[in-house]
Amino acid sequence: MVIAIGFEGSANKIGVGIVKDGEVLANERETYITPPGEGFLPKETAQHHRSRILDILKRALAASGLSPQDIDVVCYTKGPGMAPPLLTVAIVARTVAQIWNKPILGVNHCIGHIEMGRLITKAANPTVLYVSGGNTQIISYACKRYRIFGETIDIAIGNCLDRFARIIHLSNDPSPGYNIEQMAKKGQNYVPLPYSVKGMDMSFSGILSFIEQKARPKGRQARKAKVEDADQWTDEDLCFSLQETLFAMLVETTERAMAHTGSREVLIVGGVGCNVRLQEMMSVMCEERDAKLFATDERFCIDNGVMIAHAGWEMFRSGRIKHLDPGFAQHLGKFVQRNVTEGNPPRAQQKRVQELRPLAEGEFSAIVSSCKKYKSETKNVDRLPLLSNPRSEEQEEEE
């Protein structure tokens, strides 16, 4: 029996999840929500995560009925994602691992989504459509590796939807994509949009630029249900048209990947995978190919700590573990000094190192005080790369 705890914070979601041999024991999560028409910036997102992560951790332990002594391995998102939020999660996860004297594992965010989808749906070896705010990829597993068959060549589909939601000032609660989905259900007229599929890859930036010109200014009060001329569309029509066009591109490229792999299963993962219309369109294609469609609901599609815990659980069982050495505090201090942005005063650099060192040494109470200081002190940490940045073992040994 292996119990894993996972910390997720690659974007505007901060979550902690606990799993035991494939069983979900806790899935606590909060979202950083900004006003309508605004996105979330890395610095402010990290501040939100720092202020909430300890409370979420306590709730996860309470929901699972476990104590720190019951945890076998600590897992955290090492990327891809936004650097400041990822750094926050990495520091807390490494601190917790040292306090509890547990091994630690950095988990790839994308693989976390896929493995979570396979766990919940019981899909065997599907063609994976990974659609989120930062990624759009068609993936399949072969020869002990996940292989990308197609992807976006510019922005992710979730980013496209989010940016359009900001243009028409939709609420970010619970998410821009969800509110676009609800608006699209009321759309009556299809607006022809660019359709950009290039082989196995897709492009969304041109579609976004085109539909921006079609979006009506929010200052206009007229909200007519019918189209009066070719240039007059309701926001509902635009949301409907955008969804239909984007999802048709995803279905086409996914079907091509299935033809390459011979797969009879499709698994949709990522935040956009919650969209019911996308699932409907994909199910029609799967039915025509005598294939099965697998998808989860918002509990597991949207970023969560459980997916990190489960992927880490799989890695732990395979023997991929890492123990924090006693000199971790000194290593962290050197890392900060080496990576602080050039041009900042040396005094600010030294102060930042002094603030981060207690975290590495395992003083749990220091996490709270340091998190509060982050809001008003120097900004260096917000420009640092990940603590677990990809570097070879040879490079680490040389240093």
Image: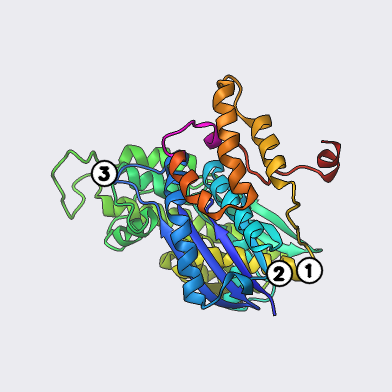
Counting other residues with Cα less than 10 Å from the Cα at mark 3, is it few (<14), some (14-19), or many (20 or more)? few
Between circles 3 and 2, the one closer to the viewer is 2
Q: Is residue 192 visible?
A: yes
Which badge, 3 or 2, is on the more N-terminal residue?
3
Pointers 2 and 1 in contact (C-beta within 8 Å): yes
Q: Residue at x 64, y 49 (%)?
A: 361
Is residue 41 found inside the magenta-colored segment of the image? no
Q: Residue 318 carries which label?
A: 1
Image point (31%, 41%), residue name: 214
**Three-letter code, disc 3:** Ala
**Magenta span of residues:** 374-382
Residue at horizontal 19 percent and vertical 54 percent from the top: 226
Q: How far apart are marks 3 and 1 (CA)?
A: 59 Å
Taking the image as shown, residue 272 lies to the left or right of residue 142, namely left
Tell me the quarter of the image containing the C terminus: top right
Q: In which quarter of the image is the N terminus?
A: bottom right
